[in-house]
């Protein structure tokens, strides 16, 4: 059995595992499985020098990753009006199982998922190991992880429309203190809102890459609009800030540290929050400070209420 056949079998098993979790109502496990598989498919689709898959097959893999991401998003957003349903996803099983011979049109009008994202909870921390393994066996490509994630302009979203009696949150990312701030390449911050189980409550956003560094600080000066009204955030939710930078020797973008802000900390004005060591612990159970030095993430909050 060839390596590519074994890989496809693993993808199919992962697909079945995710849809089983989904049908059983184990949504957190389903989301994790979908996101892990989506990243694996994405990786397979974006190795430009790979002869294992044709260009059409790579597009199909990218579209499968898009559908997995759409189902994952549907499970995380209970108020979505355009859910990608489980029965829709199950229609893709014959495609993922027979991707080498499938020659019909793709059943959904979607585009291959872009290179940015999709990393399952804790997955990003495994990239370093994978990259080193690839380097040893020669399977890696300089393009595999070298693309700057995100694009220089970031993926920030506009402020939501106001609603009577509801509060919107704008967070200005002012600066972050790091002892090696000047050595960080293409630094940016990923902002997400998670519930107690680490499930996304609204879209993840990346700031543009920061260009100003001064002593032990990297300055951002950018506004992030939280994509959910304060009153609609679930009890125990938190806003996470993951500081990421590019590692040229290993050719991928890595999380260096993270910080978070809980609901009782959301109030107008400046706030300084502590930095924690990776991997990002979205469930907030095993936290370890990055440093004992007085280096923090500096933010300024504005609350908008009609």
Image (cartoon, grey):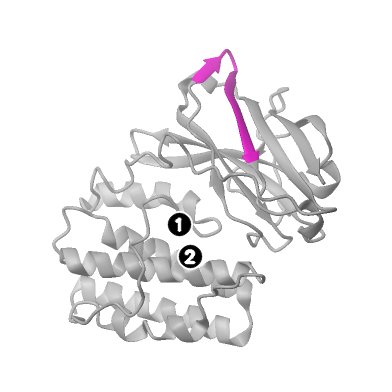
Residue 279: % across, % down = 58, 48
Is 241 above or below relative to 210? below
Can you say which quadrant of the picture contains the N terminus? bottom left
The CA distance from mark 1 to mark 2 is 7 Å
How many neighbours does mark 1 have within 10 angstroms: few (below 14), some (14-19), or many (20 or more)? Answer: many
Identify the residue shown where x is 28% and y is 62%: 44
Type of secondary structure dominating the magenta stretch = strand
> As rendered, which of 207 and 33 lies closer to the eye?
207
Q: Is residue 128 visible?
A: yes
Is 185 above or below relative to 141? above
Q: As drawn, is 12 to the left or to the right of 58?
A: right
Residues at badges 1 and 2 in contact (C-beta under 8 Å)?
A: yes
Q: Name the disc covering residue 118, or none.
A: 1
Is 249 above or below relative to 195? above
Q: As drawn, is 237 to the left or to the right of 19?
A: right
Q: As drawn, is 64 to the left or to the right of 262?
A: left
Q: Name the disc covering residue 227, or none.
A: none
Residue 22: % across, % down = 56, 81
Whether the magenta-drawn stretch holds residue 218 is answered as: yes
Q: Please provide the residue range marked out in magenta.
A: 212-224
- Residue under label 2, please give it: 35
Residue 147: % across, % down = 33, 41
* SS for dot 1: loop
Is 179 above or below relative to 148? above
* SS for dot 2: helix
Name the image quarter holding residue 149.
Answer: top left
Identify the residue shown where x is 66% and y is 50%: 160
């Amino acid at each position: 059995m060839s390596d590519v056949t074994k890989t496809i079998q693993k993808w199919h098993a992962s697909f079945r595992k995710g849809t089983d979790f989904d049908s059983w109502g184990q949504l957190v496990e389903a989301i994790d499985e979908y996101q892990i598989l989506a990243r694996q498919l994405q990786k397979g689709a974006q190795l430009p020098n790979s002869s294992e898959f044709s260009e059409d097959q790579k597009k199909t893999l990218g579209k499968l990753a898009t559908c997995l991401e759409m189902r994952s998003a549907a499970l995380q957003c209970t108020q979505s009006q355009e859910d990608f349903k489980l029965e829709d996803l199950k229609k893709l099983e014959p495609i993922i199982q027979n991707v080498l011979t499938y020659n019909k049109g793709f059943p959904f009008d979607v585009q291959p998922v872009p290179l940015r994202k999709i990393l399952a909870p804790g997955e990003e921390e495994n990239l370093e190991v994978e990259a080193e393994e690839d380097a040893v066996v020669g399977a890696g490509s300089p393009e595999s992880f070298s693309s700057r994630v995100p694009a220089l302009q970031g993926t920030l979203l506009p402020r939501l429309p106001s609603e009577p009696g509801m509060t919107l949150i704008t967070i200005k990312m002012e600066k972050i203190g790091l002892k090696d701030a000047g050595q960080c390449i293409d630094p940016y911050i990923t902002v997400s809102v998670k519930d107690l189980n680490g499930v996304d409550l609204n879209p993840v956003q990346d700031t543009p890459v920061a260009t100003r560094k001064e002593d032990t600080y990297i300055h951002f000066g950018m506004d992030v609009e939280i994509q959910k009204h304060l009153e609609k955030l679930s009890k125990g939710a938190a806003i996470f800030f993951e500081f990421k930078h590019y590692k040229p020797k290993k050719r991928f973008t890595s999380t260096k540290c993270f910080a978070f802000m809980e609901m009782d900390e959301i109030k107008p004005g400046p706030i300084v929050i502590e930095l924690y060591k990776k991997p990002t612990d979205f469930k907030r159970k095993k936290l370890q400070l990055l440093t004992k030095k007085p280096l923090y993430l500096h933010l300024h909050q504005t609350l908008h209420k009609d």
